[in-house]
Image: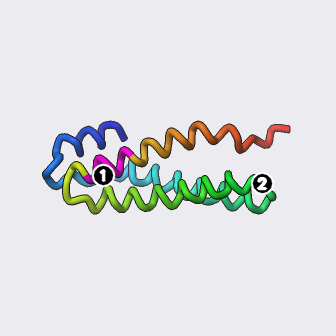
Amino acid sequence: MRLAGAAAKAKAGLKPAALAPTLVGDLQRFAVAANRLSLEIDQRGGPTDLRCIFRGMAEETDAQLKAASAANAGTAQSMALSRLSRMLKDAIAIAPTVGGGNG
């Protein structure tokens, strides 16, 4: 995602390149996984805040992917990719709180 963001910044006022299909696919899979995790937390009676956080991540991923894909200028695409990057860093920080099924 860093490369896509850098490429978008380089074309600040110009029409940015389309996002790589692999990047889009990976982000779409993340959104589906986050949504499923939200539902699983809800079904198991887990913490409401975690359920909402993961549902929000799924929605934010979809919104920022649409914004990045529809951007008419590199600046707009770069901003959407930056939001996605920050959200993914948050997901990494929050993921350990979900817990595993190892015991």
The quarter of the picture where the C terminus appears is: top right
Report whether 16 appears left or right of 53.
Answer: left
Label annotation for residue 19: 1
The answer to whether marks 1 and 2 mark residues whose Cβ atoms lie closer than 8 Å is: no
Q: Main secondary structure of the magenta part?
A: helix
The front one of 1 and 12 is 12
The image position of residue 31, as x and y in percent, is: 52, 56
- Determine the secondary structure under disc 1: loop
Of the 4 image quadrants, the one containing the N terminus is: top left
Q: Secondary structure at mark 2?
A: loop
How would you rate the neighbour count of disc 2 (Cα within 10 Å): few for under 14, some for 14-19, many for 20 or more?
some
* Mark 1 / mark 2, whichever is N-terminal: 1
Q: Is residue 46 left or right of residue 76?
A: right
Amino acid under label 1? Leu
Tell me the number on the disc at residue 10: none
Disc count in the image?
A: 2
Q: Residue at x 35, y 53 (%)?
A: 21
Q: Residue furthest toward the right? A: 103
Q: Residue at x 46, y 55 (%)?
A: 61
Left or right, 63 with reference to 92: left
Looking at the image, the residue that sits furthest to the front is 49
Q: Which residue is mark 2?
A: 46
Task: Tell me which residue sits at (46%, 51%) in the image.
Answer: 27
Distance in Å between CA atoms under marks 1 and 2: 35 Å
Identify which residue is drawn at 61% across, 53% down: 53
Between marks 1 and 2 in the image, the one whose residue lies nearer the viewer? 2
Quarter of the image where one finds residue 25: bottom left
Q: Amino acid at mark 2?
A: Gly
Question: Which span is picked out in magenta?
Answer: 76-82
